[in-house]
Amino acid sequence: LGGSPDVTPGTPVTIRVQGTDDAAIGSLRLTGTGPAGYAFDETRTTTPTSPAQADFVVPVPVTLADGQALVFTAVARDTAGNASAPAS
């Protein structure tokens, strides 16, 4: 994950998560936190492959004010169940 795109409160954004493994990725998970208790947590099961990617449509709260941030973390899990280090 990288960058800090500007977002419009109330308008969802798409975040693409990618992962690689020496065997195959089985799932990708994206979690997010932000002000006023904002929380996002979704997992996408992927066709076992490497690299793998998944798009997540993330809601942006209408109450998000200038200067406030949403922070997202991605984790890839291989088909054996091993999780990657989190990427933010």
Image (spheres, grey):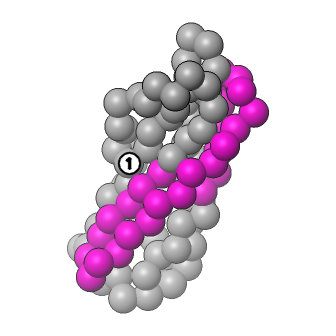
In percent of the image, x 75 and y 33: which residue is there? 47
Residue 72 found in image quarter? bottom left
Placement of 1 over or under 52, stated as above or below:
below
Q: Residues within 10 Å of mark 1 (few under 14, many from 20)?
A: some
**Foreground of the two, 28 or 66:** 28
In percent of the image, x 38 and y 48: which residue is there? 73
In percent of the image, x 63 and y 48: which residue is there? 44
Q: Position of residue 20 (x, y in %)?
A: 56, 22
Going by the picture, which residue comes out furthest to the top?
22
Placement of 11 over or under 30, stated as above or below:
below
Residue 80 found in image quarter? top right
Quadrant placement of the N terminus: top left
**Foreground of the two, 28 or 54:** 28
Q: Position of residue 71 (x, y in %)?
A: 32, 58
Placement of 44 over or under 42, stated as above or below:
above
Q: Amino acid at mark 1?
A: Thr
In percent of the image, x 44 and y 39: which residue is there? 75
Residue range in magenta is: 30-56
How many numbered marks does the figure carry?
Answer: 1
Going by the picture, which residue comes out furthest to the bottom?
63
Instruction: Confirm whether residue 86 shows in the render.
Output: yes
Q: In terms of secondary structure, where does tag 1 sit?
A: strand
Instruction: Confirm whether residue 5 shows in the render.
Output: no
> On the image, numbered disc 1 is attached to which residue?
73
Is 40 inside the magenta-drawn segment? yes
Is 33 inside the magenta-drawn segment? yes
Q: Position of residue 70 (x, y in %)?
A: 34, 65
Indicate left or right for 9 with 50 as reference.
left
Q: Position of residue 2 (x, y in %)?
A: 40, 43
